[in-house]
């Protein structure tokens, strides 16, 4: 009897996955009170709401508004502007909690010793400048290409 | 409802939302997860070893490296997971929402996978800020969720294996001109697809759907259609797709570059957002737990302090002055914290082995260390003989050329190669051979 390798792999992975999930549940139940596990469940729900409901929606909205506003712009310019916004946002997600925690203080002065808020603002400015330079660079490049040959640069 | 889901999926389709992209990002994210899992297991067992476990003491930067990679890979997961979720987001609106019982399990496992991953990296990041605004204990949760995540990852790979294998290679995903080759079922939904799907369940013929939908929903979709994704030509789609890949790459490289200096010296100069900064702290070294937090006072560490070393009934005590008269050694060893930051430092003190020899300890005997701190998980810890007998393991009195600051464990602390900072016991009071 020949075993379908795809099926064999899938079965193995599902069995392994279920065992690990059970182990995770076992560790969870063994190491904390039910109320704490309920706390984790609450954070699971919050995580899904924050991502699927807020982050994804805002991303869609901003992308949509950019497309609407940038109807006449080359797609590459839109992509560059989007890249600038995305990178800025990801730094916001990582650094804003640090800036907030620093502002409410820490008992250990060697934790969060840097100026996170001001540095984030500077970084945003740097990203904005780089984005603008990239847009200008692309536009100049595209124009030259267009002059050289009549190939459209989309 | 069905129409709403179909229309939502249709307007969400963009050039970068396709299975090949999901496979590319999924691979990277999967690697990052496995790296975090592996280094996390290592860190866990260093702190809570099984009786039979023996650990390598070289290279002495081993834990610095493994835990630095753990935290750095965890930070890299932020852009990667957000990118991955962006790509697969339309899948949230699949029709019908639940096909059958297996489908229900599949969706539930995805929900757990996504939620656990987001909670894991978020609380992990907050832990590096020593900030715990969540209603559950960090350490136990981080440990348990690691199994939940890797388990759901295995199930996710099993479910998606046909798609993963279909789009694994570049050559099967793109034609010679670099245009994406999608199977029919993976093509983005069009107006016609939505109409056709609805026609199956609707008796009357269906035209261009959004025009036919009355009320708010129809108007919203019409408005969204006024600025569809720019996929008029394959070239435009390719620019958009490559832009997306470049964005995720730049974001990942940038978050790593601007934070990893807390773990890797070479990036210290651009460590702008790391929660720790090399050389910031007493003795030019950051502190994980302050003397104040550990309730270690000057009274406890004053002239009356002495270190007790015992093996069974043989007990010896050493004042700081006693230790200073012994042969002292200088070693360069890193402090490497479970929270990922680390820094190389120069320590001066007596070899632990010399102290143990004074009570006749055998080379294969382990050690129990007790600190002056009032409470805490690491007040009493154990050290395997491989560390206790190592040439580099010191009971240190000095750090970077000066006496230990009280926050670094004055009067004396342990420093051993390749161990987590929490096990480099500060404010030593007792060493028992066991």
Image (tube, rainbow, N blue to C red):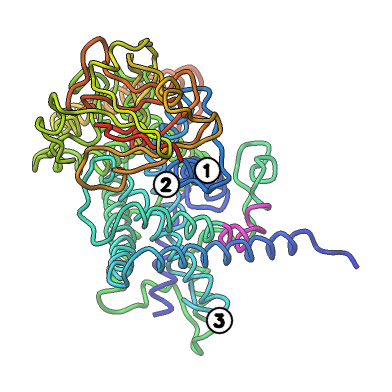
Q: Position of residue B312 (x, y in %)?
A: 43, 39
> Could you tell which of marks 3 and 1 lies nearer the N-terminus?
1
Decide which of tag 2 and tag 1 comes sooner along the chain: 1
Query: Distance from label 3 to label 1 (Cα)?
Result: 33 Å
Q: Quick one: SS at disc 1?
A: helix
- The chain letter for the residue carrying disc 1 is B
Which residue in the structure is indicated by mark 3? B101
The span shown in magenta is B154-165
User: Are callouts 2 and 1 both on one chain?
Assistant: yes
The residue located at (42%, 57%) in the rendering is B145
Q: Is residue A148 above or below residue B113?
A: above
- Chain letter for mark 2: B
Outermost residue toward the front? Answer: B313
The quadrant in which residue B403 appears is top left
Chain letter of the residue beneath label 3 in the structure image: B
The reply to whether callout 2 and callout 1 are in contact (CB within 8 Å) is no
Q: Which mark is residue B38?
A: 1
């Amino acid at each position: 009897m020949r075993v379908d390798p795809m099926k064999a792999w899938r079965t193995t992975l599902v069995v392994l996955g279920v065992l690990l999930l059970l182990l995770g549940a076992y560790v969870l139940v063994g190491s904390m009170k039910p109320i704490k596990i309920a706390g984790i469940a609450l954070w699971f729900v919050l995580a899904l709401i924050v991502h699927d409901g807020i982050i994804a929606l805002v991303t869609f909205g901003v992308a949509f508004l950019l497309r609407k506003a940038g109807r006449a712009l080359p797609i590459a310019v839109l992509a560059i502007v989007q890249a600038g916004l995305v990178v800025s946002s990801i730094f916001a997600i990582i650094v804003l909690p640090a800036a907030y925690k620093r502002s409410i203080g820490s008992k250990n002065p060697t934790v969060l010793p840097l100026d996170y808020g001001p540095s984030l603002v500077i970084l945003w400015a740097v990203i904005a400048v780089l984005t603008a330079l990239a847009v200008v660079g692309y536009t100049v490049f595209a124009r030259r290409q267009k002059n050289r040959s009549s190939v459209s640069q989309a | 409802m069905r129409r709403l889901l179909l229309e939502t999926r249709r307007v969400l389709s963009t050039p970068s939302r396709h299975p090949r992209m999901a496979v590319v990002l999924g691979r990277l994210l999967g690697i990052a997860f496995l790296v975090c899992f592996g280094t996390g297991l290592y860190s866990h067992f260093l702190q809570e070893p099984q009786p039979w476990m023996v650990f390598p003491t070289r290279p002495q930067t081993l834990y610095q490296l493994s835990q630095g990679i753990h935290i750095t890979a965890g930070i890299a997961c932020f852009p990667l997971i957000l990118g991955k979720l962006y790509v697969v987001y339309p899948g949230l609106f699949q029709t019908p929402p639940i096909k059958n019982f297996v489908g229900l399990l599949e969706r539930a496992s995805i929900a757990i996978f996504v939620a656990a991953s987001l909670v894991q990296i978020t609380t992990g990041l907050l832990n590096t800020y020593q900030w715990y605004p969540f209603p559950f204990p960090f350490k136990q949760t981080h440990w348990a969720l690691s199994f939940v995540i890797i388990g759901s990852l295995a199930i996710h790979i099993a479910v998606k294996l046909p798609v993963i294998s279909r789009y694994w290679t570049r050559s099967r995903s793109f034609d010679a001109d670099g245009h994406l080759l999608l199977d029919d079922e993976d093509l983005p939904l069009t107006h016609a697809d939505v109409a056709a799907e609805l026609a199956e369940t609707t008796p009357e013929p269906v035209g261009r759907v959004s025009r036919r939908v009355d009320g708010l929903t129809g108007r919203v979709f019409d408005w969204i259609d006024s600025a569809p994704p720019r996929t008029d030509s394959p070239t435009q789609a390719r620019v958009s797709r490559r832009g997306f890949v470049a964005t995720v790459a730049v974001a990942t490289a940038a978050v790593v570059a601007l934070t990893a200096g807390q773990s890797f010296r070479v990036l210290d100069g651009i460590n702008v957002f790391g929660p720790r900064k090399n050389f910031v702290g007493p003795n030019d070294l950051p502190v994980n737990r302050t003397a104040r937090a550990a309730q270690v006072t000057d009274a406890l560490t004053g002239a009356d302090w002495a270190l007790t070393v015992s093996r069974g009934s043989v007990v010896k005590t050493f004042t700081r002055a006693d230790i200073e008269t012994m042969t002292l050694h200088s070693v360069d060893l890193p402090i490497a914290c479970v929270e990922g930051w680390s820094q190389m430092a120069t320590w001066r003190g007596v070899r632990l082995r010399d102290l143990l020899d004074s009570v006749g300890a055998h080379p294969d005997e382990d050690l129990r260390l007790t600190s002056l701190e009032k409470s805490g998980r690491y007040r009493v810890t154990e050290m395997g003989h491989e560390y206790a007998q190592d040439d580099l393991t010191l009971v240190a009195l000095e750090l970077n050329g000066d006496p230990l600051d009280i926050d670094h464990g004055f009067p004396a602390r342990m420093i051993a190669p390749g161990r987590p900072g929490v096990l480099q016991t500060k404010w030593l009071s007792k060493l028992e051979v066991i």
